[in-house]
Image (cartoon, rainbow, N blue to C red):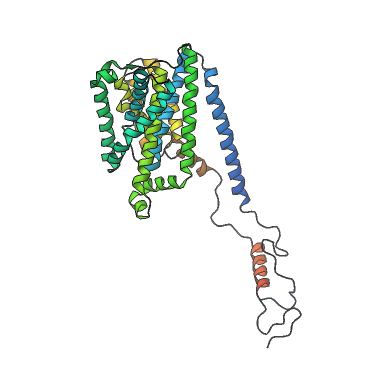
Amino acid sequence: MPNASDTHPPPAPGRASPGAGPAPAGGAAPRALVTVGRAVRLVAFLAGAALVLSFPNMAPNPYILSSGVIVASYACTATAWNFMGGFTGYISLGHAAFFGLGAYATGILIRDLSWSPFLAWLGAGAITVLVTVPVGVAALRVRGASFVIVSIAFVLILLLVSQAWRGFTGGSNGLVVPRPFPDLLRPEHHRVFYYLFVALLAVMLLVWWAIDRSRFGAGLKAVREDEDKAQSLGVPTRNYKLVAYLLSALFTGLSGGMYALWFGDLDPIFQFSILLGAYMVLMALLGGVRHLYGPLLGALIVGGALEYFKLEYGDTQLHLVAAATLLGVVVLFTPDGIIPAVRDLVRRFGPQDASIREVTAEELLADNRAAGDADPPAKGVTGPGGEAGR
């Protein structure tokens, strides 16, 4: 209780009481860590962007440059897949259907309608979305393993159609797409399309980043965590899932169309391959489906490994064994991906924030004195300049 001799006013809010010493800086360390983390991420982003943009100049030969184009196309397809698989948790093994649809639509629009290459590429993206609308409405009525089976059935149907419809798709002989830059030599052709794939990837990453921080993205994450609970809370889960599915199909179709313009020779067995869809899933899972750069990291690892195995061991099935082994390792040891695993490891061995701040005896005494000074004078105690209470 205050006495009559304590006539100094209580400390103002945010100021330490007299004799209490300097105010504790309990939040300074976490704020400093956040600032350092942001600086590290910015430096890593700039270094990675510089490395990606300078890769064509560092490639020692055209083969390595062409491998870079393939890895960039893998990064685009894995990121496109992540719009559906990462946000909603719906695992699709049939995204190769959208890849092949975009590729064949691009080639057919150029061959039959004489569209310019990149106008046909955009038109192929629109066609992919139009075809995906009824497929998505039907497929998204089921979940889990049933959705996986439906996605596989769709890609198998398109594979059979592309092989049987010889007059339209070329059948098993495939389809030849004219090169958009016929005057360029092959190395320069690779260089141009490397940057085109990187530009497409940058657009995808920007859209993914914007969705991740939007209300729409929060709804998709709610679907991923508990769809029934999200629906009971008023989230329009069916519409949200359909929009995510269409975005994923659009970007996958654009990736396929870009591949058609670059490679020029379409084979239905490759364009509509379930294995290609499995590679998309593996890349996204390896890097981390909940992280912006997860599919990109997975594409660098898986795509680089596939090209290495094909170069060293030729046309064998050893790369399939390696991919299956890698998928098993990911599922068993890093189910959330490499990036979340490394981040958790850093947090585990880094500085820890205490849940309860330790208070010294001097700080406790000063706090008690400040609280006592703030209390009004009790009955019967003379206040400063006042009369004794009755």
Dividing the image into 4 quarters, which one contains the C terminus? bottom right
Q: Position of residue 50 (x, y in %)?
A: 57, 26
Dividing the image into 4 quarters, which one contains the N terminus? bottom right
**Residue situated furthest bottom in the rendering:** 390
The residue drawn where x is 25% and y is 18% is 166
The residue drawn where x is 34% and y is 34% is 130
The foreground one among 129 and 265 is 129
Question: Where 43 sits versus 121, above or below?
Answer: below
- The answer to whether any part of residue 276 appears in the image is yes
Q: Position of residue 7 (x, y in %)?
A: 75, 74
Q: Position of residue 178 (x, y in %)?
A: 39, 15
- The answer to whether any part of residue 285 appears in the image is no
The foreground one among 208 and 132 is 132
Q: In the figure, is residue 60 to the left or right of 265?
A: right
Question: Where 362 sits versus 200, above or below?
Answer: below
The foreground one among 218 and 166 is 166
